[in-house]
Image: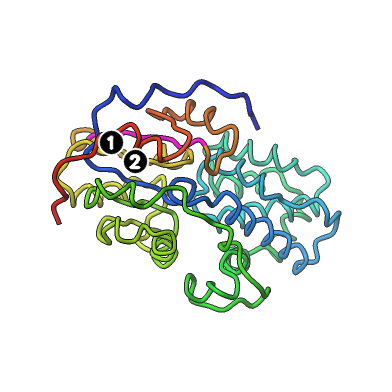
């Protein structure tokens, strides 16, 4: 994937000042650069063992390579990403003509991103033997379960996902996460803060509580995968914005899907509230984030979410409840 850096977008000062802020969680409020990628890589490796895939077991999907899927877009759901990576791993195991992982993800991105682009690519290019192996071995249900078990571990899987681990024991990758922002920095914005995340509701509430953010984000301003919303679907933004009176909103995220969410909202609701996208560079897309945000059309980029708060004066009155 391209790693040549590009200049960031203009500094944060000269735009319409926001009076409401919406945050993604991972890569923005919480450092998940090791947790979800680590869980995905482990889940694919465990799947290879369970499915008895032939080939070199020491050529896995690595945690670092999961950033490529984020750059391609359409992978806001970590477990869909896990399944899509396993599709390639199975294809590669049974078809010597299969593309490399980098080529696979690049072709997915060129087709618009997401699992459907991956499945279409396999339909068109994979050998009959590989297609049959994928059909027999690789299911979303299995890969989703493996990913969740690897992330939650013994201590959190039941709380976050409603079941106990079946295929592994020990602590989960969630243990390595840390907060990226001092919660007190959000105090001046109390009541003017929202969340739109790919996490489900228990994951969201658990992460916010664990890192001290729970009291900062009112429950009715939190949109999650449990609301049947998957970015870049803009309805998550729309639902939050119907509940606030202010006109100028910033959404702070760290992936192409976050940026596309804002662009989709602008297309669908051109005459309503103004939504500006701020891309965080030190998130899920890795060193090439500036390249992809520039291509996507981000309004601004920052290294961390703290820079957003540094650039903004404290707002006035509290939110309408």
Q: Nearer the viewer, residue 201 or 132?
A: 201
Q: Position of residue 185 (x, y in %)?
A: 33, 46
Colour style of the rendered protein structure: rainbow
Quadrant including the N terminus:
top right
Q: Position of residue 165 (x, y in %)?
A: 61, 76
Q: Is residue 112 above or below residue 90?
A: above
Give the quadrant of residue 5: top right
Which secondary structure, mark 2?
A: strand
Residue at 36%, 52% (x, y): give it: 183
Q: Position of residue 279 (x, y in %)?
A: 43, 35
Give the quadrant of residue 133: bottom right
Q: Is residue 86 above or below residue 314?
A: below
Q: Nearer the viewer, residue 173 or 165?
A: 173
Q: Which mark is residue 275?
A: 1
Q: Position of residue 311 (x, y in %)?
A: 33, 31
Residue at 47%, 74% (x, y): give it: 159
Residue at 41%, 37% (x, y): give it: 259
Q: CA distance from mark 2 to mark 1?
A: 7 Å
Residue at 23%, 39% (x, y): give it: 314
Which secondary structure, mark 1?
A: strand
Residue range corresponding to the magenta coloring = 274-281
Circle 2/circle 1 CB separation < 8 Å: yes
Give whichever of discs 2 and 1 has the lower sequence position.
2
Q: Is residue 206 above or below residue 4?
A: below
Neighbourhood count class around disc 1 (C-alpha, 10 Å): few under 14, some 14–19, many 20 upward: many
Q: Nearer the viewer, residue 46 or 157?
A: 157
Q: Main secondary structure of the magenta part?
A: strand
Neighbourhood count class around disc 2 (C-alpha, 10 Å): few under 14, some 14–19, many 20 upward: many
Left or right of 222? Residue 118 is: right
- Tag 2 residue: 251
Is 280 magenta? The answer is yes
């Amino acid at each position: 994937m391209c790693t040549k850096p590009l200049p960031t977008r203009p500094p944060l000062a000269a735009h319409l000042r926001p009076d409401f802020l919406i945050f993604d969680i991972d890569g923005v409020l919480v450092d998940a650069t090791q947790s979800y990628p680590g869980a995905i890589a482990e889940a694919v490796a465990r799947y290879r063992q369970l499915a008895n895939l032939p080939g070199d077991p020491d050529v896995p999907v690595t945690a670092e390579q999961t950033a490529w899927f984020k750059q391609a877009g359409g992978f806001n759901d970590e477990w869909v990403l896990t399944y899509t990576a396993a599709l390639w791993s199975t294809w590669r195991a049974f078809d010597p003509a299969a593309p490399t992982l980098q080529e696979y993800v690049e072709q997915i991105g060129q087709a618009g991103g997401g699992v459907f682009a991956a499945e279409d690519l396999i339909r068109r290019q994979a050998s009959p033997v590989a297609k049959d192996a994928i059909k027999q071995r690789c299911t979303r249900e299995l890969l989703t379960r493996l990913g969740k078990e690897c992330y939650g571990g013994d201590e959190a899987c039941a709380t976050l996902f409603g079941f106990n681990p079946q295929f592994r024991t020990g602590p989960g990758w969630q243990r390595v996460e840390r907060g990226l922002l001092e919660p007190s920095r959000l105090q001046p914005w109390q009541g003017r803060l929202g969340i739109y995340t790919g996490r489900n509701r228990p994951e969201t509430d658990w992460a916010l509580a664990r890192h001290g953010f729970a009291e900062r984000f009112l429950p009715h301003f939190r949109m999650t995968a449990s609301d049947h919303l998957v970015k870049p679907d803009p309805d998550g933004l729309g639902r939050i914005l119907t509940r606030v009176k202010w006109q100028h909103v910033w959404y702070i995220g760290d992936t192409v899907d976050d940026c596309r969410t804002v662009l989709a909202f602008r297309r669908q609701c051109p005459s309503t509230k103004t939504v500006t996208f701020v891309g965080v560079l030190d998130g899920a897309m890795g060193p090439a984030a500036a390249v992809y945000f520039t291509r996507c059309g981000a309004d601004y980029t920052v290294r961390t979410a703290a820079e957003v708060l540094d650039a903004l004066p404290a707002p006035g009155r509290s939110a309408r409840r």
